[in-house]
Image (cartoon, grey):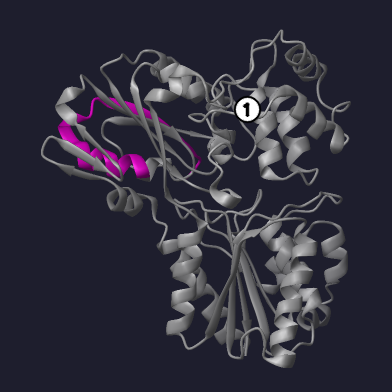
Amino acid sequence: MKKSLKKDCLAIFKAGVKAVDPYQAVYNFLRVEGDFLHLPNHTFKISAFKNIYVIGAGKASAYMALALEEMLRDKLNGGLVIVKYGHGADLKKIKVIEAGHPIPDENGLRGAQALIELATAFGKADLVFCVLSGGGSALIPLPPTGISLSEKQEVTKLLLGCGAAINEVNKIRKHLSRIKGGNLAKAVYPATLICLIISDVIGNNLEAIASGPTVADHSNFFECKKILEQYHLFDRIPPAVQDYILRGLRGEAPETPKSEDIIFKKTINLIIVSNSQCLEAAEQKAKTMGYNTLLLSSFINGEAKEVAKTQAAVLKEIITFNRPISRPACIISGGEPTVTLRGMGKGGRNQELALALGIEIAGWKGAAALSAGSDGTDGPTEAAGAYVDWRTVERAQESGLDPYQYLDHNDSFHFFEQLQDLIITGPTKTNVMDIIVLLAT
């Protein structure tokens, strides 16, 4: 039973990921016919532009750029995209720089500097495509003068480990950057900017995706300080960052561009694919496999261990009362939970959620689940996530493993590694948050 349920979970997950392929998404969204470029609600005459460039950042950006390179052919002059290590593509005219994620590194800094220099060289008669996806925020670190990359790295580590939601993390990132929070659009102006976006945030908030480099920012320095204080981090961040935020509050450091800024009159931001399409495709796959299905939500967030309790409650309800749907059942959810680090183990939010879920459904015969990142990576590990079922805890204890201890130490990777229940896909070249698959048979 375990083997077939695990196989089913994987098939459903993979169907969801396949539906949000970035290369295909660009082809589905854009059309080039002769001298005309067609987008939903927009048509451009290509010959009206002097030059056409492609820039961008994110785990999926190289394959989005590849599609544009093929579509535009000799009409394309060049460009630059920055991707996570291992997420590159073979591009002819567009340069690819690989950099660190989720913690920014020197390659990312060099890439961001090259990107902003290229952007400021564009002219009024140029057309610029910007391809953005999840991961873009960490891949283009360009701190203000007076703040070093290492200081920004320290702030990022503190934020990622405190349980803050990604939109809160990105508000800080935007105010510690010369490229995020609308600043890339500011650099590109007065060229025409078309930004194609793969969403990896709950609710598809444009300001949050890759920290919104081409979008007006509605957050401010006051919110940044409030978030840092809420998570008891303000006194722990480097003094140079503290000073910069305080200067921002006094109006001595520049705010991010706001919606009334003229630069956004020549900027078009378009989401070409999101978590919803991924979940819908996963649900359709489950139906073809004979499951009664329910797409529960694409807004899953909160502490991974708490999310696990709610997901387990749904499974228990189905197994006990055949509601809200009857067995054999498949419940699909998506979103981006968080983890508050308390131990020194290795893992990611999907593996932690799966371990907590495995504990909750222990002994509930017929219950199984998978939680995995659509990008193929979960936290600082090579796994996308993990699989559990009603026998996971029993199997662990038979092998001398204490699941509660591994959970307390945030060491879900090593737990699932020993049970051979890690989900390892390698880079999927896309990123639309996480997928949670629940099965009740």
Q: Determine if residue 115 is in view.
A: no
Is 400 placed above or below 45 here?
A: below
Residue 128 lies in magenta, yes or no? no
Q: Determine if residue 255 is in view.
A: yes
Q: Which residue is drawn at 74% across and 76% down?
A: 312
Q: Name the residue under label 1.
A: 174
Bounds of the magenta segment: 64-87
Q: Which residue is drawn at 34% across and 39% down?
A: 65
Query: Residue 119 or 34: which is nearer the viewer?
Result: 34
Residue furthest to the top in view is: 252
The reply, left or right, for residue 360 in relation to residue 61 is right
Percent x, y for residue 318?
A: 69, 86
Q: In which quarter of the image is the N terminus?
A: bottom right
Q: Which residue is drawn at 45% across and 61% down?
A: 277
Q: What element carries label 1?
A: helix
Percent x, y for residue 132?
A: 45, 38
| Kind of residue sitting beneath label 1 | Lys
Residue furthest to the front in view is: 260
The reply, left or right, for residue 377 in relation to residue 95 is right
Corner quadrant of residue 311: bottom right
Is 115 placed above or below 272 here?
A: above
Query: Residue 136 or 385: which is nearer the viewer?
Result: 136
Q: Which residue is drawn at 83% across and 72% down?
A: 401
Q: Quadrant of the C terminus?
A: bottom right
Residue 84 lies in magenta, yes or no? yes
- Local crowd at mark 1 within 10 Å, few (<14), some, or many (≥20)? many
Percent x, y for residue 278?
A: 47, 62
